[in-house]
Amino acid sequence: MDIAVVGSNMVDLITYLERMPEEGETLEAPEFEMGCGGKGANQAVAAARLGSDVLMVTKVGNDLFGQNTIENFKNNGIRTEAIEVGTKTSGVAPIFVDPHAKNRILIIQGANSELTPAMVESYKEQLKEAKLIILQLEIPLESIYKTIDVANEFDIPVLLNPAPANPALSMEYVQKCTYFAPNESELGILTNMPVTTVEEIQVAAQTLIDQGVQHLIVTMGEKGVLWMTEKHVQVIEAQKIKAVDTTGAGDSFIGCFAHYVTKGASIETALEKANLYAAQAVQKRGTQLSYPTKEEFLHY
């Protein structure tokens, strides 16, 4: 197995807006779409579409959405033996996309809140077969910490994507991860520092390196990607493209990076590939639906 993703699944409820309504205002929106999402599921799908052998550990809702989510994983070639049905309804993510392809997202955890440390422990034998474990923050923090402990027990590298940002995240556990990959706004929340420019982002990033982060990867949208370690600082330029919908772009980046780094690529090469993959994804609408297959990506 290449990758195990311990994380969330959601139903994306995407509304395309001309503008956001003011308080008390009702607006008619031109379009609405619904699809499978959730940061964990998105990252798993991106990696699987590129050809990785992916195990998904997640809790789906006890409703039609939950069954549809399981079928979606199967259709994308993702292992489903560690997927359980919870007692709650499915997690949902209402997403609002403006004409400039910028998005605002709400999340309701639903059954994702039932992905407990005990559930992680029950799939320990499967997890120890992975070359890399990916985590995000749409499941309980104690389950994140349990997964990191399991990964460390078997000397498996962890990629932690701190999204959505949670200031309560333990830096002690962040230090145990090989890769820590926030976007610029998440970096700002975690450090309580300005992140408007690349220079400000680097200053904020340095504070995390000083706290023991091993490989810090900051996705900065149109400003590119910052990769920083104790002895290395590099900015990889963004692709010059016209985005249609940036929803799930960060997840496509994470999934692609994980795919290439577990296949033996250098970190720099994996970051460059991930940058290209995310650039291709944002040129189509939707989240997982916008993620290229291996064949589509090779022809980009």
Image (cartoon, rainbow, N blue to C red):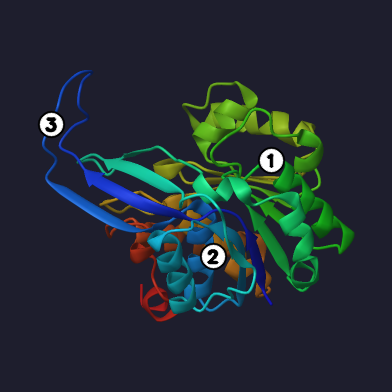
**Viewer can see residue 271:** no
Amino acid carrying label 2: it is Ala
Q: Quadrant of the N terminus?
A: bottom right
Q: Are marks 3 and 1 in contact (CB under 8 Å)?
A: no
Q: Residue at x 28, y 48 (%)?
A: 14
> From this viewpoint, is residue 274 visible?
yes
Q: Position of residue 201 (x, y in %)?
A: 56, 31
Tell me which corner region of the image, top left, top right, bottom left or bottom right, holds residue 124. Answer: bottom right
In the rendered structure, find residue 141 and report the number of the disc placed on it: 1
Quickly name the residue at label 3. 27
Neighbour tally class for label 2: few under 14, some 14-19, many 20 plus, Cα within 10 Å: many
Q: Amino acid at mark 1?
A: Leu
Residue 220 falls left or right of residue 82: left
Looking at the image, residue 180 sits to the left or right of residue 103; the answer is right
Instruction: Report the amino acid beneath label 3.
Output: Leu
**Quarter where residue 279 is shown:** bottom left
The disc, 2 or 3, on the residue closer to the chain's N-terminal end is 3
Toward the viewer: 133 or 9? 9
Q: Is residue 19 above or below residue 80?
A: above
Query: Circle 3 — which element?
Result: loop
